[in-house]
Amino acid sequence: MTESFRRDGEYEQYDNPLQGAQQQHASSPVNPEWPPPPAQPPMQPAQAAAPAPQAAYGGGNTYGGSYGGDGGGTALLTAIPAEPAPKKRTRGPLALLAAVAIVAAAIGGGTAYGIQELTGNDTVASSSSTSTSVVPSSAKGTVSGVAKAVSPSIVEINATSNAGESTGSGVIITSDGEIITNNHVISGATSVKVSTSDGKTYTAKVVGTDSKKDLALIKLENASGLSVATLGNSDGVQVGDEVVAIGSPEGLTGTVTSGIVSALNRDVTVATEESQGQSQGQGQGGGDQWPFEFGGRQFNGDTGSSTTTYKAIQTDASLNPGNSGGALIDMNGNIIGINSAMYSAGSDSSTAGSAGLGFSIPINTVKSDLATLRAGGADS
């Protein structure tokens, strides 16, 4: 078969010298006597065609070195870029993932910056977290530091009614004079006067009352630029936490006492009648403290038939008549409660004194009731 194949002259019929070289190379093992085709001339078209795929994939001499001396024709047939192709496909997704990561990072950074621009960096002033520090770092954790930082936002309230005059305290919550206090401090009042820590006196009007929670909101007339208290988060309070109380017991404006949180979620029952409210904390002329019930027993007088019960923070910080409506404060300067009831062993103010049993309305209860109070209160 080899001789007849040679006599047909099929090698000479190839117009493409490259194809001839390939066929001759394939036939040479059949008849060793037949001279092999020249090695060098066919390599020139193969080398001329090879650089394009090699250059495209950065292969250099990879294929030439792999197949050794089999000749240029064979190198052309096998130099198909099959193996480098996955490398190119791999680089594509990796590059895409990298690009996506960069874009995501840019978008994330832009979002954070946008939020900063919208909210600002000083929003902590009205934060509800007990970790917000109102006290300067140099005085942090000290009673004196808390007193200095918070006292300007605590006021003395004098309410006058047909039943007489009562003294209590309040907490400034807006710079134009909104003040939170106890309902029993201003209940039934025909006029309300407020004194700030700098000695200024304002006339106030009652905005709203909620006797069921013993809360009230009053508003100073023609006030601006007042120091505002920071309302904390009473849910974060724990038994044993140090606290400070500021108020006006017996008309002594800005009195500061300190202690700890003795217990949480105490059920305290207080009166809602106006007549009972006016007897609390009278700085002049004597009078009983605000009566309350606790543990099935009544203290400081008869609560009457109209009462309400709420969950209170118990503290051993000294509270006396006139502290009602004032602030219970954590050591970062955040208001965590509104002082509302205190036990006294005496029957009137001449023998009354703190026995380390004070109760405060949690500040979260106050915050949840603010909208109702601003709309006129639950009693309207």
Image (cartoon, rainbow, N blue to C red):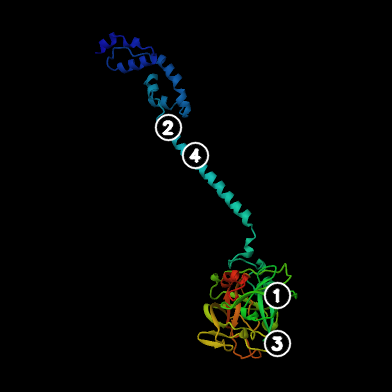
Q: Mark 1: which amino acid?
A: Ala
Label 2 to label 4: alpha-carbon separation:
16 Å
Residue under pointer 4: 95
Observer-nearest of 292 and 31: 292
Residue under pointer 1: 204
Q: Is residue 99 above or below residue 224?
A: above
Q: Earlier in the sequence, mark 2 or mark 1?
A: 2
Left or right placement of residue 186 versus residue 295 in this view: right
Q: Earlier in the sequence, mark 4 or mark 3?
A: 4
**Residue 11: mark in rendering:** none
Label 2 to label 1: alpha-carbon separation:
84 Å
Please say whether residue 331 is visible from this viewpoint: no
**Residue 85: mark in rendering:** 2
Label 1 to label 4: alpha-carbon separation:
69 Å
- Dot 3 falls on a residue whose secondary structure is loop
Residue under pointer 3: 284
Mark whose residue sits in front, 1 or 4 = 1
